[in-house]
Image (spheres, rainbow, N blue to C red):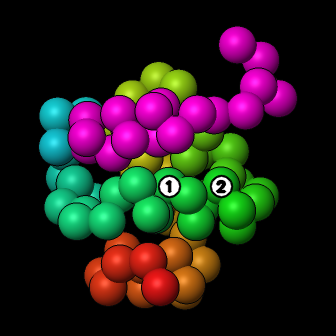
Amino acid sequence: MTLDTPLTDAQLRNAARQLPRAVTGPFRDCDHAEAVIRHALAQGGAAAHWARQYVLTLHGPDWNAMVICLDVAGWLIWYQGAR
């Protein structure tokens, strides 16, 4: 899989389901993980890079890096869900 290979819906769902196992610390409790991942991918830049890395690796540090790069809309999705 290359960096340009599209991510599938199944990969995004799996990454969201794995969040409680993969991530520890303050960023582990996200009720809308799949929506946050999708937003980060659409946001572009560093957030998209780290979102993609998390989906592909399921490494908690990749999730944490993505969260740090989220814009305000991403944080609203985190707390309220997708609109």
Question: Residue 1: in sight, yes or no?
Answer: yes
Farthest right residue? 4
Asked if disc 2 and disc 1 are in contact, CB closer than 8 Å, the reply is yes
Residue 51 is left or right of residue 33, and the answer is: right
Question: Is-magenta flag for residue 2?
Answer: yes
**Callout 1: helix, strand or loop?**
helix
Question: Residue 61: in sight, yes or no?
Answer: no
Question: Is-magenta flag for residue 77?
Answer: no
Q: Residue at x 33, y 45 (%)?
A: 16
**Callout 2: helix, strand or loop?**
helix
- Residue 27 in the image, given as x and y percentages of width and height: 27, 59
Q: Picture quarter containing residue 13?
A: top left
- Residue 63 in the image, given as x and y percentages of width and height: 42, 47
Residue ID for mark 1: 37
Q: Nearer the viewer, residue 9 or 65?
A: 9
For residue 14, above or below residue 46: above
Residue 23 is left or right of residue 65, and the answer is: left
Q: Picture quarter containing residue 32?
A: bottom left
- Tag shown at residue 4: none
Residue ID for mark 2: 41
- Residue 8 in the image, given as x and y percentages of width and height: 58, 33
The amino acid at mark 2 is Leu
Q: Nearer the viewer, residue 2 or 68?
A: 2
Could you tell me how far apart the alpha carbons at marks 2 and 1 are, in whole angstroms? 6 Å
- Which residues fall within the magenta stretch? 1-19
The amino acid at mark 1 is Ile
Q: Residue at x 25, y 63 (%)?
A: 30
Q: Quadrant of the N terminus?
A: top right
Q: Picture quarter containing residue 50?
A: top right
